[in-house]
Amino acid sequence: MALLEVQDIVIRFGGVTAVAGVSFEVEERQICGLIGPNGAGKTTTFNCISGIYRPNSGRIVFAGQEITGLPRHRMTGLGIGRTFQNLALFRSMTVRENVLAGAHAAGHSGFLASALGLPQVRREAAEAEARARELLALLDLERVADAPVAALPFGWQKRVEMARALISRPKLLLLDEPAGGLNHGEVDELAELLTGIRRNFQLAILLVEHHMSLVMRVSDKVAVLDFGKKIADGTPYDVRNDPEVIRAYLGGGDDHARAA
Ligand SMILES: Nc1ncnc2c1ncn2[C@@H]1O[C@H](COP(=O)(O)OP(=O)(O)OP(=O)(O)O)[C@@H](O)[C@H]1O
C-alpha cells in the first residue's frame, strides 16, 4: 500500500476545471516530483492534498485512511507537513520560535492542560525544545537561531519553514516550489538538504517545482500534469524522454505560457 494515494481527483473553480481526474501515488520514503507547465493544475492538486481545497470528486488516502476534504489543521496530526510557496512565517519572531510554533500546532495537550502547566505539557515542551535544537543543527540554522526571521535572506527563511514542518515528525512532507527565488548555489544546497532530510527522517516528499534540474536530480519518480490531466508518471529518465512530456513543454500553445 502506498503512503499517499491520490485517486481520480477533479477540482473545478466555476467553469474552469483545474484538475480533471488526476491519480498518482507516493510510496513511503519516496521523493516524488509533481511538474507541468504553467496552469497545469499542480498547485491546485497540492492544495487539495494539504486540505486547502476539497475536490469535487475523487479520493485522497494517506497511510490507509481517507483524508479527502479534511481541514488543514488535522493534516499535521496525521503526519503531513507542508511549506508554502510564498512563506508563511511569523516574521517578527525568531528562527527558534518559528520552528517551535510547528510543534505547538501538532501538540496533543489541550488548552486546559496547557493553561494549568500539567506535567504532560512540560514534557511535550521539553521534547519540542530538544527537537528544535536538532533541526536547527541539521538545517545549519544554529547561528541564526535567535535572530528575527525577517532579517534572514529568503533562502534561509525557506529552511526555517522546512524546520517548522519537520518538527512535527511528518511521514510526508509537501513542498511547494522550494527552489523558487533561490540562486544556483542555493538550489544545489537544497538538493543536498532534501536527500539528507529523507535519509534522516525516513519520510516521503512530494515536491511541486518548476526547477527541472532539481526535480530530476532528487526525485525517485515524477508525475507530469498538463491541462489538469496526468500525462506521464515514471522515473526522471522515463519522463524526460516521454514524447508527450516533451510536447507539453515545448509545444507552446498560445493559451498558456510554457516553462521549459
Ligand atoms: N482559485 C482559483 N479560481 C479560479 N481558477 C483557478 C483558481 N486556482 C487555479 N485556477 C485555475 O486552474 C488552473 C490550474 O492552476 P494551478 O495554479 O493549479 O496550476 P499550476 O500548475 O500550479 O500553475 P503554475 O505553475 O503557474 O503555478 C489554471 O487554469 C488556473 O487559472
Image (spheres, helix red, strand yellow):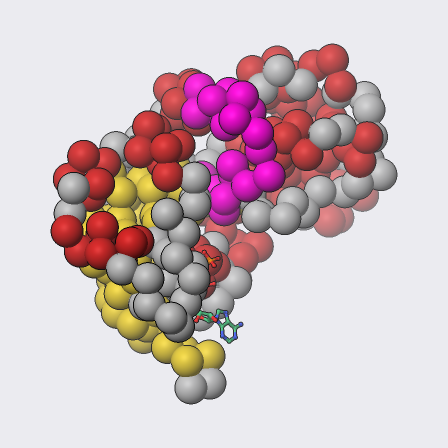
Q: From this view, report whether residue 81 is shown above or below residue 137.
A: below
Residue 237 lies, in percent from the top left, at 18, 34
Residue 6 lies, in percent from the top left, at 28, 57
Q: Residue at x 75, y 48 (%)?
A: 112
Q: Which residue is drawn at 71% across and 42% down?
A: 89
Q: In this view, does 27 lie to the left or right of 129?
A: left
Q: From this view, report whether residue 155 is shown above or below residue 53.
A: above
Q: Give the range drawn in magenta.
A: 172-193
Q: Which of 118 and 218 is in front in this view?
A: 218
Residue 178 lies, in percent from the top left, at 52, 38
Q: Can residue 9 be seen in this view?
A: no
The image shows a total of numbered marks equal to 0
Picture quarter containing residue 253? Answer: bottom left
Residue 106 lies, in percent from the top left, at 59, 42
Q: Does the magenta stretch include residue 33?
A: no
Q: Residue at x 82, y 24 (%)?
A: 147
Q: In this view, does 117 lie to the left or right of 14?
A: right
Picture quarter containing residue 58? Answer: bottom left
Picture quarter containing residue 167? Answer: top right
Residue occupying the far bottom of the picture: 15
Q: Which residue is drawn at 76% across and 28% down?
A: 152
Quadrant containing the N terminus is top left
Q: Does the magenta stretch include residue 191?
A: yes
Q: Is residue 208 visible?
A: yes
Q: From this view, report whether residue 43 is shown above or below residue 109.
A: below
